[in-house]
Image: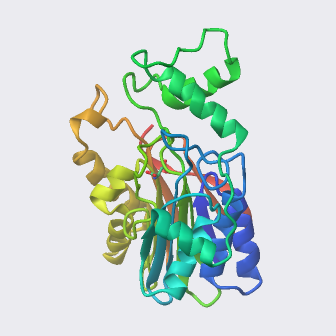
Amino acid sequence: MKTIASHNGLKATAESWRLLAAGRSALDACVEGVTQVEDDPDDLTVGYGGLPNEDGVVELDAAVMDGRTHLGGAVAGLRDVRHATRVARLVMEHTSRVLLVGEGARQFALAHGFVAENLLTEQARRMWLYWKRRRSTLDDWLTPAEDEDLELRAWYEKRFYRPEFPGGTGMPGGTVHCSALDGEGHLACATSTSGHAFKLAGRVGDSPILGAGLYVDNQVGSCGSIGHGEANLRHLSSFLAVELMRGGREPVDAGLEVLRRIVDKTPPRERDAAGRPTFQLMLFLLRRDGSHAGVSLHAGRQLAVADATGQRLEACASLWD
Ligand code: ASP
């Protein structure tokens, strides 16, 4: 038994491991694990407290996939309902469909008893307004003064400006992914996100797309990803990683190979002066035999792991230091 998650998923792996150890399925483990992060108002990238789209509305994407049945369920652009992954599970279990979007997904959730609430926290609202004021000098919004809102300024500069990528967009994203291997040898995975901060209204990323933001094949392994979703959408990265493991690659080699292919085809507008992608991307791989890896384009990232030896953060292997 084992469970792995993105760096922000320690709460997910703790809950996921607790359920696995109690004999529950990999599907229960990863869905309920991710739900813990959706509930956390301090995670600005997932569920309640996630940063909104450019209009100030939180829109969630999430998906689950169950290796035991090879079924999947997903929601995209879901408003007002924080537990997007549980809703995705119900799409998988109560319908013959895979993906519901927007108002249809919301109505489906409400029909199943999920409570509608405002997902925009005070903190996220303030960050959104700060972003609106900072992003351009060509609109009606006045740029905040140097000494105004120093905390927000520091946050904004850390998140949207990275000296290694002058001119780049930084990393206005984040997501939680969790994969689990249960006591019966079944795999499952879940990915949940509020998507890129301040995205275009209606933008859907990789997280709710089976094969892109997550994929599992019970005979091979599971993979999920966080980072620049458009790169995963163009490469079906999670599917590719599982297929490379099927071909005999170790999880770390499969993950790094996916990243190399992405780098190879990254468009010029998403590269820095040295040709490296200006975005970050992480893949988390869990093979059927319990071996695992986390990989990232740029160094310094971690993954959360829980197994019989305990819970820990491990370093991701990366293409660049
Ligand atoms: N992959 C997510 C998306 O593109 C965001 C992220 O993980 O940073 O919506």
* Residue reaching furthest to the top: 146
Compared with 237, 265 (above or below) is: above
Please report the residue visible at 38 percent of the width from the left and 72 percent of the height from the top.
242
Residue 30 point in image, percent of width and height: 62, 72
Compared with 294, 88 (above or below) is: below
Residue 310 point in image, percent of width and height: 75, 66
Q: How is the image coloured?
A: rainbow
Which picture quadrant has residue 131? Answer: top right
Residue 69 point in image, percent of width and height: 47, 90
Tally the marks. 0
Q: Nearer the viewer, residue 55 or 308?
A: 55
Please report the residue visible at 37 percent of the width from the left and 69 percent of the height from the top.
211
- Which quarter of the image is occupied by the C terminus? top left
Is residue 168 toward the left or the right of residue 36 in the image?
Answer: left
Residue 290 seen by the camera: no
Q: Nearer the viewer, residue 220 or 150?
A: 150
Residue 44 seen by the camera: yes
Please report the residue visible at 41 percent of the width from the left and 47 percent of the height from the top.
228
Compared with 115, 313 (above or below) is: above
- Which quarter of the image is occupied by the N terminus? bottom right
Is residue 239 toward the left or the right of residue 173 in the image?
Answer: left
Residue 180 point in image, percent of width and height: 59, 74
Is residue 103 toward the left or the right of residue 245 in the image?
Answer: right
Which picture quadrant has residue 209? Answer: bottom left
Is residue 28 toward the left or the right of residue 222 in the image?
Answer: right
